[in-house]
Image (cartoon, rainbow, N blue to C red):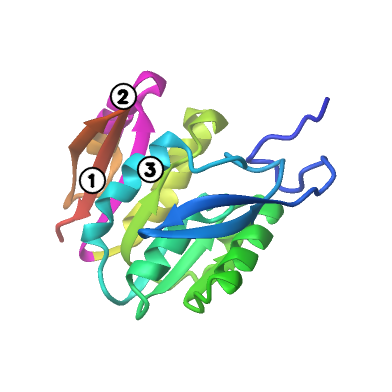
Amino acid sequence: MSSDHYFSEAPDSKFKPKEIQVEIDGRAVSVTTAGGIFSPDHIDQGTLVLLDHLDEVPPSGNLLDVGCGWGPIALSLASRAPQATVWAIDVNQRSLDLTAANAARLGLKNVKVARPEDVPAELRFSGIWSNPPIRVGKDVLHEILQTWLPRLEESAEAYLVVQKNLGADSLHRWLEDEMPVGFSTIRVETAKGFRVLRVKNRV
């Protein structure tokens, strides 16, 4: 049995690509996925709930998908905002390779895939969308959020989807307590057992 997790940097399982049919920003498309990444067989329910909030996507600027998997969020952002640059980051190299391949396949030239440490330190984001990796544990999750959320531009927003029974409400409280002065967190939706939290830099 493989010891792979979707947050493994280099999955041990043999790379076996497969095609799946999905809807990206209202368009039926084929994408490539593989084992050893998050939700390789379909767009997971949490991400589907999050993608209901694409109306808030800024038309330009730098947008960020934290934990891109095979790319459903990044591809949707890039399709919705062709003038924006969409940064798709993940620690899993297989995820990065698949997101890059899927972006190229769909003609989305505004997607940049990167390991977290390779994103320019001075870059600030006009919006962040993420289905964060809850199963890495609270300490690692909090470190991820403390790294990226403070990099929101003034008045910019982040949208996070978290399963209610995996600590969405406790994460909401943590965000209220730990984000920098001037940041606010509100719950904007509850659907299918998930919460969507909006974090805004009001500074």
Q: Nearer the viewer, mark 1 or mark 3?
A: 3
Q: Residue type at mark 3? A: Leu
Q: Quadrant of the N terminus?
A: top right
State yes or no: residue 166 in magenta.
yes
Q: Nearer the viewer, residue 54 or 32?
A: 32
| Mark 2 surroundings within 10 Å by alpha-carbon count, few (fewer than 14), some (14 through 19), many (20 or more) | few
Mark toward the start of the polypeptide (1 vs 3)? 3
Q: Can the viewer see residue 66? A: no
Q: Which residue is pictured at 29% across the width and 53% down the height?
A: 158
List x then y, in percent, for residue 174. Answer: 30, 32
Q: Which residue is mark 1?
A: 198
Q: Which residue is mark 3?
A: 48
List x then y, in percent, for residue 197. Answer: 26, 40
* Occupied quadrant, residue 77: bottom left
Q: Which residues are magenta?
A: 154-174
Q: Which residue is pictured at 65% across the width and 43% down the height?
A: 37
Q: Which residue is pictured at 40% across the width and 36% down the height?
A: 46
Secondary element at image label 3:
helix
Cα–Cα span, label 1 and label 2 = 14 Å
